[in-house]
Amino acid sequence: MKTEQIETFLMITETKNLSLASKNLFISQSAVSHRLRALEESLDCELFIRGRGEKLVTLTQKGEEFIEIAMRWRALWRETKIWALQESKMNLSVASIDSLNTCVFSNLYRELINDNISDNKKVSNSSNGITLNVSSHWSKTIYDLIENNDIDIGFTLNSLKYPNAIAKPLFKSRGVVISSISSKYARLVHPHDLNTADEILFSSVPEYHIWHNFWWEKNQNEYSSVDTVSLLFTVFDFEEKWAIVPVWIARVFERMHPVKISELSVLAPEYTCYQVTNRHPKSSRLKAIDRFTTALEDYMKKDVFINSVQ
């Protein structure tokens, strides 16, 4: 069964006349008859009743029933042709630790999603937008997902050794102390000025824990801890509570409500953000990865990014 046979069948059902059908299709009447016979042979049933030499035709019961099927066939074929002319959609899966998703890359995601919405509104045979899927995970889970090619790009503060995962340093940021705007802490503080009984431990970076235990080894079990930015927000209304966080978390806090940001006179280890990708990415995702990488590079040149990490 061929598309031109379906088109011919539907034209005959509209005109009920072989001569008029051939005229509308710009083919000879004998070609119309040939297509019709070929269609009936492929379906193994008679679709029209027609007498020898007669131009008018009448649908059989099977012919009546076949009209809806033929119309669906034609619609599907037209949809298939449109699909074939379109550029494939670019899908991309990104995973990051919660704090980077919330405080550093949210504006980048917003730009990409907005670009995709704008592209979809344009009347065009192609689209440059990315269909973005973002999720938050622990660092080890991100590496596992990258290793198995379950996600395309990951962001984390840890460099872990995996056979197929490549960790590329993106940027570094210092740690600062955040506390209530009315806290007793100065704008420059020494670790000995900070009471661990009032600490909300946030960092999951091994280097920081080594530094932390060096200064507060005797009191290392006194502090409270949280593991997401949203939790840190909710527990930070107490006057003497403090936390050491990457400066980009402090900047978000500063925008949301009054907070005191204090520098450390003895610097804590810097927080390094890594972009993690698979050594052998899926070929179907290469274009989306390139588009995302370009967008990321452009984003990192903007003030909204630079001001957040410095």
Image (spheres, grey):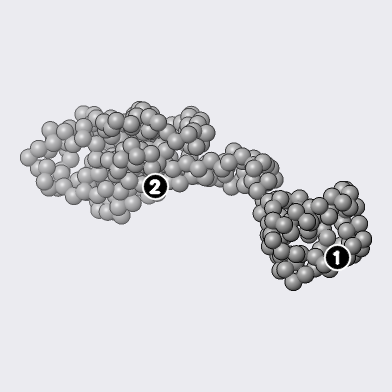
**Mark 2 highlights which residue?**
135
Going by the picture, which residue comes out furthest to the left?
218
Identify the image quadrant of residue 7.
bottom right
Q: Does residue 282 appear in the picture of this structure?
A: yes
> Seen in the image, is 40 located left or right of residue 209?
right
Residue 81 drawn at (x, y percent): 68, 46
Q: Does residue 291 appear in the picture of this structure?
A: no
Badge 2 amino acid: Ser
Foreground pick, 92 / 100: 92
Label 2 to label 1, Cα distance in Å? 64 Å
What residue is at 39 percent from the left and 47 percent from the top?
135
Image position of 188 with respect to 222: above or below: above
Going by the picture, which residue comes out furthest to the front?
52
Residue 300 drawn at (x, y percent): 46, 31
What residue is at 79 percent from the left and 56 percent from the top?
36
> Seen in the image, is 22 located left or right of residue 277?
right
Identify the image quadrant of residue 146.
top left
Foreground pick, 146 / 30: 30
Image position of 122 with respect to 48: above or below: above
**Mark 1 highlights which residue?**
50
Q: Quadrant of the C terminus?
A: top left
What residue is at 84 percent from the left and 50 percent from the top?
31
Residue 261 drawn at (x, y percent): 31, 39
Circle 2: element type: strand
> Seen in the image, is 264 located left or right of residue 133?
left
What residue is at 48 percent from the left and 29 percent from the top?
297
Count residues near mark 2 (Cα–Cα under 10 Å), then give few for <14, some for 14-19, many for 20+.
some
Residue 227 drawn at (x, y percent): 27, 48
Count residues near mark 1 (Cα–Cα under 10 Å), then give few for <14, some for 14-19, many for 20+.
some
Q: Which mark is residue 204?
A: none
Badge 1 amino acid: Arg
Circle 1: element type: loop
